[in-house]
């Protein structure tokens, strides 16, 4: 091989190596730029919001391709405890006001707390309904296997309010609540576990939110609406943590949840639009929450 040919081959090799090096550097630079442009939002949400919020997250990310939403789903009381202990999060969506208040008392949230969606209690029974549960009165029948949430899970707090109110109604009698509680065979840490017990045939009935009977379990579980004016209205609050790493992004996500599009997704999953609050007076709303003052307020109203 001539010296000229060797020299040309060496120059070609050097050029190829240079092109490869520049291409690799550009790839790393592009990846770093993309990583810097992507934003992550951490949302703590009650387990009853799982399906709806996953769809909300997908819808939001489709409009904001540089944003990733990371959800942490659990019972509101569990999430409140984690937040109080310093778990990093940008947004907290609770199933009741008491657990939101616990996070506020811990100093993690001092800004605005907004109600963002409503729910209702319902009886959940197996599709074949072996215990023939049809009404609230059936909950105190003998040999009923009842599963509820444990304290202080919000759905249990609402359930306790319901049973206490019914016990003040002459149609049920003052021993109604105690009779129902005698049938409890299991207490679960969140509503999804209550539904799981029903699906597995380990209980005759459970008290859940109407939104918990989702299409994927509709062949196994039936929701029986609680047709009573004494059933509390479930109000879900949402707020941004004070130490959010992306407060503007968190605000935008909350606004999306409150938007017409966000509310439509929630309604699709069995929730009630927050706009329904506009049709009720303040006294009714205050009394319909599962707060310790609720029963006293109700008694005062009735008297």
Image (cartoon, rainbow, N blue to C red):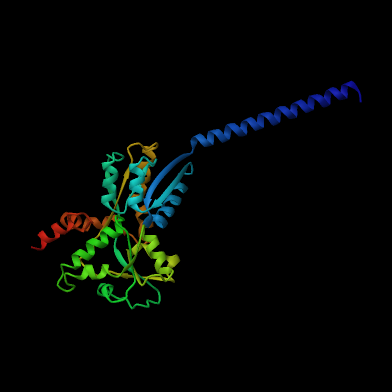
Residue for point 37% across, 63% down: 194
Residue 151, image x, y percentages? 29, 57
Q: Is residue 197 left or right of residue 142?
A: right
The C terminus lies in which quarter of the figure? bottom left
Q: Residue at x 27, y 69 (%)?
A: 182
Q: Nearer the viewer, residue 232 or 84?
A: 84
**How many numbered discs, if any?**
0
- Foreground: 281 or 113? 113
Instruction: From the top left corner, tell me how far across and down residue 249 is, in percent.
Output: 39, 40
Q: Is residue 231 above or below residue 70?
A: below
Q: Can residue 118 be seen from the camera position used here? A: no
Of 134 and 6, which appears nearest the observer?
134
Q: Residue 268 appears at what percent x and percent y?
A: 38, 61
Q: Is residue 296 left or right of residue 215?
A: left
Which residue ends up furthest to the top in the rendered image? 3
Q: Say whether residue 185 is visible.
A: yes
Look at the image and tell me in which quarter the N terminus lies. top right
Q: Position of residue 102 (x, y in %)?
A: 27, 46
Q: Is residue 141 above or below residue 251?
A: below
Residue 296: image quadrant is bottom left
Outermost residue, left side: 303
Nearest to the observer: residue 107 or residue 60: 107
**Residue farthest right in this picture:** 1
Q: Which residue is drawn at the image coordinates 46% and 51% (left, top)? A: 58
Image-quadrant location for residue 13: top right
Does 287 appear above or below 24?
Answer: below
Q: Is residue 266 above or below residue 20?
A: below
């Amino acid at each position: 091989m001539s010296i000229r040919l060797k020299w040309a081959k060496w120059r070609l090799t050097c050029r190829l190596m240079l092109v490869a090096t520049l291409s690799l550097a550009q790839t790393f630079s592009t990846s770093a730029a993309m990583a810097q442009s992507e934003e992550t939002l951490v949302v703590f949400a009650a387990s009853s919001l799982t399906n709806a919020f996953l769809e909300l997250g997908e819808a939001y990310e489709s409009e904001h391709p540089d944003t990733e939403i990371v959800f942490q789903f659990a019972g509101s009381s569990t999430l409140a405890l984690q937040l109080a202990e310093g778990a990093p999060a940008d947004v907290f969506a609770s199933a009741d006001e008491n657990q939101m208040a616990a996070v506020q008392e811990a100093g993690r949230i001092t800004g605005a707390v907004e109600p963002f969606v409503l729910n209702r209690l319902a009886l959940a029974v197996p599709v074949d309904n072996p215990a023939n549960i049809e009404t609230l009165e059936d909950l105190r029948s003998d040999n009923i296997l009842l599963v509820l949430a444990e304290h202080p899970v919000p759905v249990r707090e609402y359930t306790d309010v319901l049973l206490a109110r019914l016990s003040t109604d002459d149609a049920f009698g003052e021993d109604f609540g105690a009779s129902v509680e005698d049938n409890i065979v299991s207490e679960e840490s969140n509503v999804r576990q209550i539904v799981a017990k029903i699906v597995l045939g380990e209980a005759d009935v459970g008290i859940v939110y109407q939104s918990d009977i989702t299409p994927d379990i509709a062949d196994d579980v039936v929701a029986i609406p609680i047709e009573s004016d004494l059933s509390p209205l479930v109000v879900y609050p949402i707020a941004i943590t004070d130490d959010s790493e992306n407060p503007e992004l968190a605000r935008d996500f909350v606004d999306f949840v409150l938007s017409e599009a966000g509310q439509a997704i929630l309604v699709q999953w069995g929730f009630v639009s927050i706009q329904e609050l506009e049709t009720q007076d303040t006294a009714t709303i205050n009394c319909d929450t599962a707060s310790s003052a609720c029963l006293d307020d109700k008694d005062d109203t009735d008297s």
